[in-house]
Each structure stands twice: as structure tokens, then as C-alpha cells.
Image (cartoon, grey):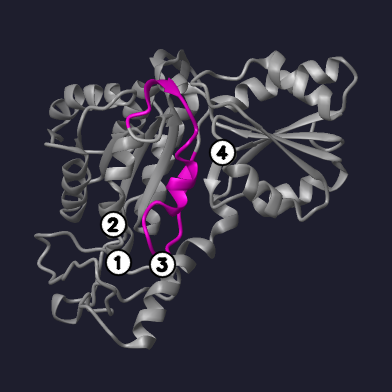
């Protein structure tokens, strides 16, 4: 198939992927290094009968996106670390009320204002545990501009399918990098739309799950269905409940609706991992550097391999546990003080030595630096 080749920035590729996925509403607030996503959406959405709104702050941005989703629109907001922190309360509301939404976090250094123009991977645990309470999380970490486009489409599909927020954990380097993006000319991506109710409005229970997928159909405001939306734990009618059985049923379903399909969601890539004595586990922009270092190590006769996490959550623990059988050492380079390395340790179950390698100076690893670390632990 003939390719339509673009030369896009990572942030622009996420915006273009969102548009291709059918996103028709963006609510946000400018913040470095994610602002280009808002700029593209501001320019393109009005041309497509969509809506862009810049709110007074990051809290308002996600609130507006949640409201738009309730009317049946595919909605997105984008931010960076400080804004991601501000969005957590409303993110929890979207998990509890089961409202589809895509949230992009182009990570930068922290805490607080931190490093507005420098790269970091310090939000990956906030992605899983930032909002309080039990719920399943779906979060992707692209590592190329091509993948920024493709994952944006996938994030919308997963959000619509599972009726919950889906996170894209990008970073400053990836967001501002420009690369070739090849699209299939004339081919539209396969899209998923939220399941609509078929019951009569008088019989409609907004949170009554269908047995086949444990998910309730979602009515839109204006469809003629009565739907009470609350952040309180609620029953199938959507009204707050203090019944222990109903509370447990709701909480379990928030976890189980994703966990039951965990193997379909988890994505990863490997290279030279089958016989690797040293396995390098990485994600995001760091994965590019790590792969280069692994290839350099192989040229030196060191049996190194690469495992790249595409999904951060659900965490690919079973896949890491299986592939680490032959490895003696697992090296985990991260642009933080050691966050995902603890999940890797949990997955390895003591079958190999796990070595963290952390960089927190606002710079990206160089291939030579990771190669040197591989040689050190070999």
C-alpha cells in the first residue's frame, strides 16, 4: 500500500492521532512541554466541527473534557507533570463514573515546577497511583513519533472500549523530536466507539453491566436516558450506596473489567532477549538509547538483550518473568530515582539480579553510558 509520509513532531503526532481516532473535543491549558498538542487541536478541531477550549487552569481542562465525553464526544486533555498532579481528582471521578477520556502527560522533571524544558520519567508511578482508590489503569509509553500517532488512536479505542481514562505517558524529548511518520494512504484506522444502550429509557440502569464484557452501555446526555453521575461509590442506578455488597461489586468491577483482558492490552517489544544474559528493561525515549547500547554490546560479544515496555500499566510482569529465565542480570535505566525498577524486581521474583540505573539531571542517557553500565554488570 502506498505510504503518505509526514515529518511530524511527537506532540503533533499525538494530536493527529487523536483527530484520526475521532476526537472532537479538547479541553486544556498550556504547559511546557505539551503545549503543541493544544496548538494543533486548536487549529484543527474547528475545521472538523469539533470544539477546543482553553480553560482557566489544568483542573478546568480535564473537567471540560469529562463533560464533553458525557455528551458522547471523544475527548482529550494534555499536560505535563504539575498539571497531571492537578488533574488527579477529576481523573478519579472519571474512573469512578466510568467516563471515556484520553489524558496525555508529556513528562518533565519535578517535583513542583521542576524542569519545564527538560526530560524526565518521574510521573510513571503517579500514572498508576496518583488518584486514590482502587481502579485499573491503562497507560502507554511511546518511544517514536510514529508510535505517538498510533498509540493516540489506540488510547481512544481502549478508552471507549473499557469506559475509563487511558493515559499516554510521553516525555519532553519525544514530544519535541521530529521524525518520519508513514501512514497508509487512503486507509482509515479501525476505530472503537462506546457501546450504546438498547433498553427502553424506563428500564435503563446506567451502571448495569452486560454479562459478556462486564461493562455497562453508556448513554449520552440528550439521548433521552436518565443518568445520575457521581464520584461517590454508587449502585447500578448511579446513586450513592452504603450497601457493602454493592460497594464491593462496583470496586471489583472497576478492576476486573480491565484485568480480565490484561493479556490483550499488554504490549512490549524485545530484541536479542531469548539468549540474553543481561536484559535491559526500558520504556519511552530511554528505550531508544537502551536498544542502541544493547546492539553495541552484542558487537562486543556481550549477550545483552532489550525488553521495551509499550504498556506501563497493566505492567508486563508475566512477560518479564518468562523472558528473564536465562538472564543473570536485569538492568533498568530510568530518568527518575528508580520507580519502575521496583515493579521489575517484583516480576523477576529473585530469578536474576536487578540493577537500577538512574539519571535525574534533565538529560537523556547516551548509548555509551548504558553500554558502560552493561559492561560493568556483565
How many angstroms separate mark 3 from mark 4 (CA)? 22 Å
Q: Which mark is residue 199?
A: none
How many angstroms separate mark 2 from mark 1 (CA)? 15 Å
Front tag of 3 and 1: 3
Q: Nearer the viewer, residue 294 or 334?
A: 334
How many angstroms separate mark 3 from mark 1 (CA)? 15 Å
Describe the element under mark 2 as helix, strand or loop.
helix
Q: Is residue 229 above or below residue 203?
A: above
Image marks 3 and 1: residues in contact by CB distance under 8 Å: no
User: Would residue 183 be counted in the magenta stretch?
Assistant: no
Region in magenta: 113-140
Residue 22 seen in render: no
The residue pinned by badge 1 equals: 217
How many angstroms separate mark 2 from mark 3 (CA)? 11 Å
The residue pinned by badge 2 equals: 94
Q: Which mark is residue 254?
A: 3
Residue ID at (54%, 44%): 312
Describe the element under mark 4 as helix, strand or loop.
loop
Instruction: Determine which quarter of the picture holds residue 243.
Output: bottom left
Q: Earlier in the sequence, mark 2 or mark 4?
A: 2
The residue pinned by badge 4 equals: 310
Q: Nearer the viewer, residue 364 or 296?
A: 364
How many angstroms separate mark 2 from mark 4 (CA)? 23 Å
Q: Earlier in the sequence, mark 1 or mark 4?
A: 1
Amino acid at each position: 500500500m502506498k505510504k503518505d509520509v509526514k515529518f511530524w513532531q511527537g506532540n503533533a503526532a499525538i494530536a493527529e492521532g487523536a483527530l484520526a481516532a475521532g476526537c472532537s473535543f479538547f479541553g486544556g491549558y498550556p504547559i511546557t512541554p505539551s503545549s503543541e498538542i493544544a496548538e494543533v487541536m486548536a487549529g484543527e478541531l474547528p475545521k472538523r466541527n469539533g470544539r477546543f477550549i482553553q480553560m482557566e487552569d489544568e483542573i478546568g481542562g480535564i473537567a471540560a473534557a469529562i463533560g464533553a465525553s458525557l455528551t458522547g464526544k471523544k475527548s482529550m486533555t494534555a499536560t505535563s507533570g504539575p498539571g497531571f498532579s492537578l488533574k488527579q481528582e477529576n481523573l478519579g471521578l472519571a474512573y469512578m463514573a466510568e467516563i471515556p477520556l484520553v489524558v496525555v502527560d508529556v513528562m518533565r522533571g519535578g517535583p513542583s515546577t521542576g524542569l519545564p524544558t527538560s526530560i524526565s520519567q518521574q510521573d510513571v508511578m503517579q500514572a498508576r497511583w496518583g488518584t486514590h482508590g482502587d481502579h485499573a489503569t491503562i497507560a502507554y509509553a511511546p518511544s517514536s513519533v510514529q508510535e505517538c500517532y498510533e498509540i493516540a488512536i489506540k488510547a481512544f479505542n481502549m478508552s471507549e472500549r473499557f469506559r475509563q481514562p487511558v493515559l499516554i505517558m510521553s516525555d519532553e524529548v519525544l514530544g519535541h523530536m521530529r521524525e518520519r511518520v508513514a501512514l497508509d494512504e487512503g486507509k482509515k484506522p479501525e476505530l472503537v466507539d462506546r457501546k450504546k444502550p438498547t433498553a427502553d429509557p424506563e428500564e435503563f440502569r446506567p451502571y448495569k453491566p452486560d454479562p459478556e464484557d462486564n461493562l455497562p452501555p453508556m448513554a449520552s446526555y440528550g439521548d433521552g436516558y436518565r443518568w445520575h453521575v457521581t464520584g461517590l461509590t454508587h449502585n447500578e442506578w448511579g446513586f450513592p450506596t452504603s450497601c457493602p455488597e454493592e460497594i464491593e461489586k462496583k470496586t471489583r468491577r472497576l478492576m476486573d473489567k480491565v484485568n480480565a483482558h490484561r493479556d490483550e492490552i499488554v504490549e512490549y517489544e524485545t530484541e536479542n532477549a531469548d539468549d540474553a544474559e543481561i536484559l535491559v528493561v526500558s520504556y519511552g525515549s530511554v528505550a531508544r538509547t537502551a536498544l542502541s547500547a544493547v546492539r553495541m554490546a552484542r558487537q562486543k560479544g556481550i549477550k545483552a538483550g532489550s525488553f521495551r515496555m509499550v504498556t506501563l500499566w497493566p505492567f508486563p510482569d508475566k512477560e518479564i518473568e518468562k523472558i528473564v529465565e536465562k538472564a543473570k542480570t536485569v538492568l533498568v535505566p530510568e530518568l527518575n530515582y528508580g520507580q519502575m525498577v521496583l515493579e521489575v524486581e517484583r516480576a523477576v521474583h529473585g530469578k536474576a539480579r536487578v540493577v537500577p540505573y538512574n539519571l535525574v539531571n534533565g538529560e537523556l542517557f547516551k548509548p555509551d553510558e548504558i553500554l558502560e553500565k552493561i559492561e560493568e554488570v556483565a
